[in-house]
């Protein structure tokens, strides 16, 4: 099976810090792990945008589970590990991981939106 070039790019960016100007910066971490029920795609990742004092203001990761919104109360639900944090106090909302390309596209689109909001309130 051929390698996914977007996955290779994501894995190559592991450990990168990207300056966004005005003191804002992005930290990218991604590595392969054995697939599991919690991480069926076999990729651990943390893509975060930080403000000048270091506080994370946006993040996409799968470091811990998040509960589905309260409107979805039912027994036996599966807790999502792929999720995003929309602001510093956000505990995370589920994110539907499709592939590395979509993850990077979604993250960088959100970065552009957040930076436009903070720079042009």
Image: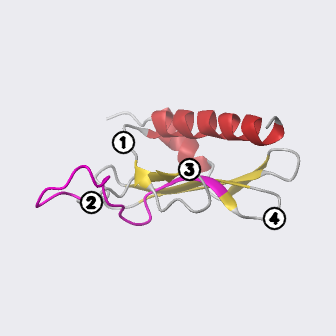
The answer to whether residue 112 is left or right of residue 63 is right
User: Looking at the image, is mark 2 or mark 3 earlier in the sequence?
Assistant: 2
The answer to whether residue 40 is left or right of residue 4 is left
Is 18 situated above or below 9?
below
Counting other residues with Cα less than 10 Å from the Cα at mark 4, is it few (<14), some (14-19), or many (20 or more)? few
User: Looking at the image, is mark 4 or mark 3 earlier in the sequence?
Assistant: 4
Counting other residues with Cα less than 10 Å from the Cα at mark 2, is it few (<14), some (14-19), or many (20 or more)? few
Distance from disc 2 to disc 3, alpha carbons, whole Å, reads 19 Å
Q: Which mark is residue 86?
A: 3
* Residue under numbered circle 4: 53
Which segment did they paint magenta? 57-79
* Residue under numbered circle 1: 96
User: Looking at the image, is mark 4 or mark 2 earlier in the sequence?
Assistant: 4
Q: Position of residue 121 (x, y in %)?
A: 79, 38
Q: Which mark is residue 79?
A: 2
Circles 1 and 3, Cβ within 8 Å, touching? The answer is no
Q: How is the image coloured?
A: secondary structure
The quarter of the rendered structure image containing the N terminus is top left
Q: Position of residue 65 (x, y in %)?
A: 35, 64
User: Looking at the image, is mark 1 or mark 3 earlier in the sequence?
Assistant: 3
Circles 4 and 3, Cβ within 8 Å, touching? The answer is no
Nearer the observer, disc 4 or disc 1?
Answer: 4
Circles 2 and 1, Cβ within 8 Å, touching? The answer is no
Q: How many marks?
A: 4
Furthest residue toward left: 75
């Amino acid at each position: 099976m051929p390698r996914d070039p977007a996955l290779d790019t994501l894995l190559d960016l592991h450990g990168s810090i990207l300056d966004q100007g005005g003191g804002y910066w992005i930290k990218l971490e991604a590595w392969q792990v054995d697939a599991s029920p919690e991480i069926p795609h076999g990729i651990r990742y943390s893509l975060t945008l930080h403000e000048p004092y270091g506080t994370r203001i946006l993040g996409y990761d799968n470091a811990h589970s998040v509960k589905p919104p309260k409107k979805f109360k039912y027994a036996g639900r599966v807790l999502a590990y792929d999720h995003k944090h929309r602001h510093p106090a956000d505990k995370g909302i589920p994110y539907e991981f499709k592939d590395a390309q979509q993850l990077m596209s979604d993250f960088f689109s959100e970065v552009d939106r957040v930076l436009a909001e903070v720079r042009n309130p």
